[in-house]
Image (cartoon, helix red, strand yellow):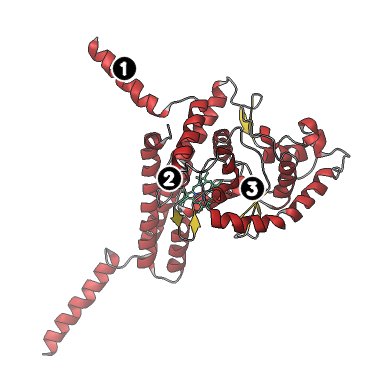
Amino acid sequence: MKKILVTTLGVALVAGLAWATPEEDRLAFIDYHKKRFPNVAVEDYVNGVYAINPPAYQQWLQIEEFPPYELAMAEGKELFETPFANGKTYADCFPNGGIGIRQNYPYFDAETGQVKTIELEINECRERNGEKPFKYSKGKMAAISAYMAFTSRGEKLNVVIPDDPRALAAYEDGKEYYYSKRGQLNFSCADCHVASSGMMIRADMLSPALGHPTHFPVYRSKWDDMGTLHRRFGGCNKQVRATPLPAQSEEYRNLEYFLTYMSNGMEVNGPGARK
Amino acid sequence: MTRKLWIVGAATIVCSGLCAGTALAADQAAYEAACKAAESAQKAAAEARYEWNTIGPLMKKAGVAAEAGDYDRAVKLCDEARKHGEAALAQSEHEAEGWKLSVVR
């Protein structure tokens, strides 16, 4: 009897090592960042690496004076407002006509049992209205997503994990992806953006994970182009010599669900500009 | 003198013929077998969502070497690709539990 008790306790302890509620995870995440960068205010993490790198922050402010994402945003606005062949528009597919809603994504859709991202729903809207879907990583998709993010600036991320075991499973799946080492270099997302944030990797300072999704899609100088969050995921997979998964694959959507939940309560400030 | 040379010569010919057929020099069949093994390791890693992006390029290089008739090199490259696939799969098995150790709490 005593032996059984001890064993059960042991199992519970090991399981407990990884298991916490999403809200416990989020609070621990913030706490970790506060300890790691005691001089950085939580709301400043929306600025990515610039929150922890003052000289780069000054350069970045100058870039933001003539934002390199402006062209894409204008294109996105036009695409967003131009009716489909059947006369309908994107506004017909989204709550509040698609304006100021970015903070509610991604969300768990009880009907399909899947995590829905804004890019996924942009294409669903197109296909429902007889239009061809866009590619997910850049181009027109990034432009529309940029415009929709812009209309939501200042709104606070509000990712909900409903009381549904499938939603919790999706969150856990994203969390597992985030902490799992992969690629020939055997690094997890967390190895770089949690345990090593603030350290240099070749010419780049590693940004902290907190606030990561707030400013997407992003104009990245290295790409000389706009990219969605999933494009960035793919790039980070490649850095460790892992084969990227397709943008909007279930794994990446679940990863976005976890990662965005960690930044709940932070302001949407997309589209952004990064090196 | 001539006889001695003849023996050495014959021995050399016999050896190179034999060895080519076995271990020293690979042929197309050896390449195809090594390539097939690499492909299946790659597939297993991809199914686990743990594929490394090193595998494809190694197999491509192997294909180029095979085309040029350099089966030795082609086999070596395929073997390397297979090892990467196997390591990726082992990584997925390790991380099935291993990821829990680094969760922020």
| Residue receiving disc 1 | A8
- The count of marks equals 3
Q: Quadrant of residue B8?
A: bottom left
Q: Quadrant of the C terminus of chain B?
A: top left
Check contact, mark 2 vs mark 3: CB within 8 A. no
Above or below, comparing residue B102 to residue B18 in the picture: above
Above or below, comparing residue A236 to residue A10 in the picture: below
| Residue receiving disc 2 | A191
Q: Position of residue A11 (x, y in %)?
A: 33, 22
- Of callouts 2 and 3, which one flags the residue occurring earlier in the amino acid sequence? 2
* B72 with respect to A207 (left or right): left
> In the current view of this chain or complex, which residue is farthest to the front?
A39
Q: Position of residue A73 (x, y in %)?
A: 75, 50
Decide: few, some or many residues near mark 3? Use Cα within 10 Å; few <14, some 14-19, many ≥20: many
Q: CA distance from mark 1 to mark 2?
A: 31 Å
B94 or A155: nearer the eye?
A155
Q: Quadrant of the N terminus of chain B?
A: bottom left
Q: Amino acid at mark 2?
A: Asp
Q: In the image, which is nearer the foreground, mark 1 or mark 2?
A: 2
A21 or B4: nearer the eye?
A21
**Disc on res. A122:** none
**Disc on res. A228:** 3
Disc 3 chain ID: A
Q: CA distance from mark 2 to mark 3?
A: 22 Å
Secondary element under disc 3, as helix, strand or loop, is: loop
Q: Quadrant of residue B48?
A: top left
